[in-house]
């Protein structure tokens, strides 16, 4: 996600000009844009014309600029677009004011979002911006005489290091461990949440064994993939197999799974935990929440319709953050989110146990 512009407007609202640069960004916007917001952008609309020279043919599609007072938003996953619907409140064609319209937002489309931003919504935008700027997956390809380190950027891959392996013969040969040692040093400096170690043969496993001994923290983030080549060709094979997407999804799920595991363990032992809307809201009022866990879909329904939970969920989030607690919004797409759904869609790890 890229923030192209931000501006304070009347009524304490703020307008952000956003450019989604991935499908993840479009998905994030699904949980940021809500009824009552004003969303504007370039779009097309079928305009009906009736005049003496032309019969009414149902209208011709024209390019216009429109600002919608939002009543619905949907991520059309299979069409790779976000659909924002509402009544046209402002438009480059005045004769379209008051009409219902849908703006289809795709990757790299510029979109103005004007609203009263809630803290977790702004956090979500900032996390999306950070994810765009910082590579979170590195691809290492290695064989007997060479190793390459690439990082995965938003629009492709970038080579970060090229390391020469053992050369020469006899006493002039460079020890194999030097290659692995230099590679390990590079990976220690690489800002990546996950590392894919790829290449032909057994060299990648030998390299992994070396890294496990010398830098176990780095090794914990590595998974191996077989490829027939190294360098750019090897990276292409990794990308073609979808290994990067798999790792990114696994990393996100792993973070959520760690929190759910701790939650379930505390529930089993009767430790410092609270779950269900009413219990969590009470914990928030006491300032007892250390980490709030909330599911994205019921959170959105509670804000849009107000009938999902009999609590003010925004107050719960605000109280948690005011008291120095953390907030994680879970995706219902993954198993940890399904577990949280079974507990009412909202739970909290507490600083201290509340007496019932």
Image: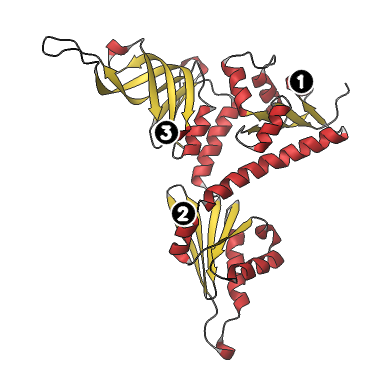
Q: Residues within 10 Å of mark 1 (few under 14, many from 20)?
A: few
Q: Toward which corner of the image does residue 300 lie, by quadrant?
A: top right
- The disc, 3 or 2, on the residue closer to the chain's N-terminal end is 3
Distance in Å between CA atoms under marks 2 and 1: 50 Å
Up the image or down, 82 lies above or below 96; here it is below
For the residue labelled by badge 2, is the local secondary structure a helix, a strand or a loop?
Answer: helix
Q: Is residue 86 left or right of residue 257?
A: left
Q: How is the image coloured?
A: secondary structure
Any part of residue 14 in sight: no
Q: Nearer the viewer, residue 94 or 248?
A: 248
Residue ID at (40%, 33%): 106
Distance in Å between CA atoms under marks 3 and 2: 21 Å
Q: Where does the image place residue 156, in percent across and percent down from the top left?
A: 43, 52
- Circles 2, 1 touching at the beta carbon (< 8 Å): no
Q: Nearer the viewer, mark 2 or mark 1?
A: 2
Q: Which label number is shown at residue 285?
A: 1
Residue ID at (61%, 66%): 184
The residue to which callout 3 is attached is 79
């Amino acid at each position: 996600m890229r923030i192209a512009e931000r501006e304070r407007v009347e009524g304490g609202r703020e307008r952000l000009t956003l450019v989604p640069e991935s499908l993840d960004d479009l998905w994030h916007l699904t949980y940021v844009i809500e009824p009552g917001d004003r969303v504007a952008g370039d779009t097309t609309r079928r305009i009906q014309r009736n005049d003496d020279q032309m019969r009414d043919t149902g209208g011709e599609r024209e390019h216009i600029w429109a600002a919608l007072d939002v009543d619905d938003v949907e991520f059309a996953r299979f069409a790779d677009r976000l659909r924002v619907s509402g009544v046209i409140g402002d438009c480059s064609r005045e004769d379209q004011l008051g009409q219902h319209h849908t703006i289809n937002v795709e990757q790299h489309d510029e979109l103005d979002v004007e609203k009263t931003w809630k803290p977790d919504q702004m956090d979500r935008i900032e996390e999306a911006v950070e994810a765009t700027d910082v590579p979170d997956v590195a691809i290492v390809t290695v064989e007997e005489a060479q190793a390459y380190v690439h990082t995965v950027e938003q629009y492709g891959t970038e080579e970060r290091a090229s390391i020469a392996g053992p050369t020469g013969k006899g006493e002039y040969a460079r020890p194999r461990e030097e290659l692995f040692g230099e590679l390990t040093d590079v990976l220690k400096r690489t800002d990546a949440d996950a590392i894919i170690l790829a290449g032909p043969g057994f060299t990648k496993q030998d390299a992994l064994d070396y890294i496990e001994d010398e830098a176990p923290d780095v090794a914990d983030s590595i998974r191996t993939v077989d490829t027939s080549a190294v360098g750019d060709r090897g990276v292409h094979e990794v990308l073609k197999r979808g290994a990067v997407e798999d790792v990114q999804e696994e990393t996100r799920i792993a973070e959520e799974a760690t929190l759910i595991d701790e939650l379930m363990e505390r529930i089993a032992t009767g430790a410092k935990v609270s779950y269900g809307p009413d219990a969590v809201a009470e914990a928030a009022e006491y300032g007892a929440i250390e980490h709030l866990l909330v599911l994205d879909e019921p959170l959105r329904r509670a804000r849009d319709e107000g009938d999902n939970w009999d609590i003010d969920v925004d107050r719960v989030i605000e109280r948690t953050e005011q008291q120095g607690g953390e907030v994680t919004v879970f995706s219902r797409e993954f198993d940890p989110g399904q577990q949280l759904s079974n507990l009412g869609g909202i739970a909290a790890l507490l600083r201290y146990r509340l007496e019932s």
